[in-house]
Image (cartoon, rainbow, N blue to C red):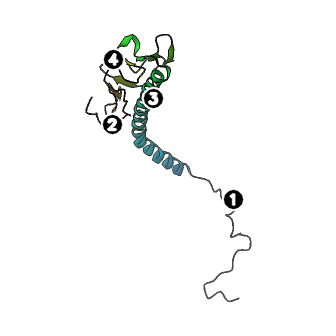
Amino acid sequence: MDLSSGLTRPNPRRSWQCPDKGVNGGFTLIELIVTVVIVGIFAAIAVPSFVSLIHRSNVRAGADELYNLLQYSRAEAVTRSTPVTIAAPGSSSANWAGDLSVKTTQQTLRQIGASGLQSGITITTAVGSIAFSPTGTSSATACFQVSYANDASVIPQFISVQSSGRIAPPVSTRPGGC
């Protein structure tokens, strides 16, 4: 056989389909450390964004829950043909994120516990309670601001209740009547 052309004969003991039996195909310690460091850097960059996302989600969920509770109160007043009142504990205008109750004159229809609608949110308004008449009108005009207590970067949500009984869905811009 002429080997002058530079071609060599393959080693019959070596398989070209898989590595040698004596060589492990795992990762080295250096490769593993570099990978862990890169994942750690990405996690450090992403965590603040996730925290802000959770806060925004809590504000939006709290605003949606309050909106649904106000809608429920008005609908029950019309359906039962009796006044229905939604109130903060002690009719305090500063505590709408906590222990809320929806009541007729005879019974409590819904009660939101002391833990409130969502954790970490505050709900501020100028009224302590709103009564819906059997015709669906409201005893007071109110504007609720739902915000996150410890994160000023989260955009608050606003819900307005008009004296006609109309309840505007949560929006991120302050309505004209607020």
Please identify the quarter of the rendering in which residue 24 is found. bottom right
Estimate the spatial distance between the alpha carbons at disc 2 and disc 3, rounded to whole Å: 17 Å
Q: Quadrant of the C terminus?
A: top left
Q: Nearer the viewer, mark 2 or mark 1?
A: 2
Tags 4 and 1 touching, CB below 8 Å: no
Q: Are marks 2 and 3 in contact (CB under 8 Å)?
A: no
Query: Mark on residue 68?
Result: 3
Using the numbered discs, state the Cα–Cα distance from disc 2 to disc 1 in whole angstroms: 65 Å
- Image spot of residue 67 (x, y percent): 42, 29
Instruction: Answer left or right for 41 relative to 151.
Output: right
Which residue is labeled 4 in the image? 94
Name which residue type carries label 1.
Gly
Q: Position of residue 78 (x, y in %)?
A: 46, 23
Compare residues 90 and 80 and report the one nearer the observer: 80
Residue 22: mark: 1
Give the left or right position of residue 149, taking residue 101 as reference. left
Q: Residue furthest right?
A: 13
Q: Nearer the viewer, residue 22 or 163?
A: 163
Pointer 1 and pointer 3: residues touching (CB < 8 Å)?
Answer: no
**Residue occupying image coordinates x 28% and y 34%:** 175
Regarding mark 1 in the picture, which secondary structure is present there? loop
Give amino acid for label 4: Ala
Disc 4 versus disc 3: distance between alpha carbons? 20 Å
Crowd around label 4: few <14 · some 14–19 · many ≥20 (10 Å):
some
| First reached walking from the N terminus: tag 2 or tag 1 | 1
